[in-house]
Image: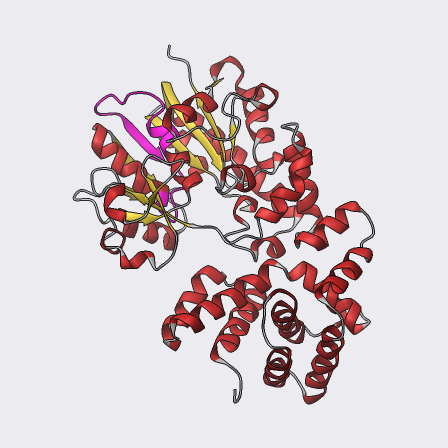
Amino acid sequence: MSGVQPARRIALDVILAVRESDAYANLLLPVKLGRAKLSTADAGLATELTYGTLRKQGFYDAVIALAAGRSVDKIDPPILDVLRLACHQLLSMRTAQHAAVDESVQLAKSVGSQSAAGFVNGVLRTITRSSVEDWHSRALESAHNDDSRLAIEHSHPVWIVRAFRQALAAEGRAEELADLLAADNVAPRVSLTALPGLSTVDELDAYASALSPVGAVLDSGDPLDIEAVRAGRARVQDEGSALAALVLSRARPTITGEKWLDMCAGPGGKAALLAAEAAESGAILIANEIVPARAGLVRNALAVFTSPPIVSELDGTEIGDRYPEEFDRILIDAPCTGLGALRRRPEARWRKVPRDVAELSTIQAGLLDSGLRALKPGGILSYVTCSPHLAETKVIVESTLKKWGAAIERVDTPAVLASVTSRALADPDEKPNGAMHVQLWPHRDGTDAMFIQLLTKPAL
């Protein structure tokens, strides 16, 4: 593609793959960057172009529709991707206008016709004639209501805006909605976890985490430059994910010989931390993952241990019947929409649709019911999702408690978390509406929006 900077070409390739084949940008981009052997500066540019375009796609679509005089649904998808990439350069970066326009026209020629390239040129020339502030105002004025206005301003689908408002309102914090949406558009810091017994925070050459007692935060650089990370003794892991594992492993002292289960272990981050905690305390961990490819990732994550935990590939919803009252501690990191990690996987906001919630909630309820059947009397279970959507969190827990009655009890999860964290979370003494669960938030805690509810089966 003559005359096109490699960083722009790679960014478009990833954006096309995300839309056409449901590729994951965080997996595909590093592969393409590695093959291209770009300089550090060009690799950084490609990363910003890719993630920035995906994050702000909703706002750019509003601008494109105004500049083109037609709905984005009427624009050929590859050409629309080119326009979105160009919009990010023109409206959110300090890219020279002529470079952004000229190279975008060349990209359009590579994925469309000569007339499509002319269309791209015309739309982008229109965009360059007005200021960023003007386009921002015009895009917001095109909104039909407050939800639509927030959706455009912060580039989230309207249904997610509404779901987030409901989740915050349940805590009496509806006024924080704009802050949450804005936080989703800020690239997260690189957080690391030092696996207990295998590494320490001190050897990670990074700032100690403000939240996780085994965590650190990397300001810049490649985590693979750290020897402990290369060796698998430390992992890249969000602080919220680490806390979700530690809340279970450190909820109370471990009795030697306890059996632990990570029911939905893929891709293996929480399983590795639980395995380290189990090895330190004399417990036995079994990791389960029904999807073979993800089970392979779990095995890779656990290979660092001298005696790696067994990895099974069972249907989690059947484990309760296969192994009734078998486990002392169970982690159910349930498959979910991932709406709590949109800052990390920005394309997920455009990939998910409301019906996904209904389908996943059926699976989540089945997994939780199975886990409770597999839990020993006196045992403790942690139900976790990386989503704050009420249908995936509180509704699942409430319906399960109603079904099980007195056979299951909530554990004061905020109190357990307070005993685990390196520092108090936001409003440490506050339990919104008397909550017994924990809901972490990107805008409040700097983590993914993890939901954590500990449950116990009273001893006989």
Left or right of residue 122: residue 26: left
Q: Is residue 188 above or below residue 419?
A: below
Q: Is residue 150 above or below residue 438?
A: below
- Residue 373 in sight: no
Q: Position of residue 342 (x, y in %)?
A: 55, 50
- Residue at the left extreme of this rendering: 306
Residue drawn at x 52%, y 89% is 2
Queried whether the magenta region covers residue 240, the answer comes back as: no
Q: Nearer the viewer, residue 351 or 179?
A: 179
Residue drawn at x 50%, y 63% is 23
Residue drawn at x 57%, y 47% is 183
Q: Position of residue 154 (x, y in %)?
A: 66, 52
Q: Is residue 250 above or below residue 286?
A: above
Quarter of the image that includes the C terminus:
top left
Quarter of the image where one finds residue 68 = bottom right
Q: Which residues are magenta?
A: 246-269
Q: Is residue 106 above or below residue 175?
A: below
Colour scheme: secondary structure
Judged by its main secondary structure, the magenta piece is loop
Q: Position of residue 212 (x, y in %)?
A: 37, 36
- Residue 330 in sight: yes
Residue drawn at x 22%, y 25% is 257
Q: Position of residue 96 (x, y in %)?
A: 60, 77
Q: How many marks?
A: 0
Q: Nearer the viewer, residue 145 or 256?
A: 145
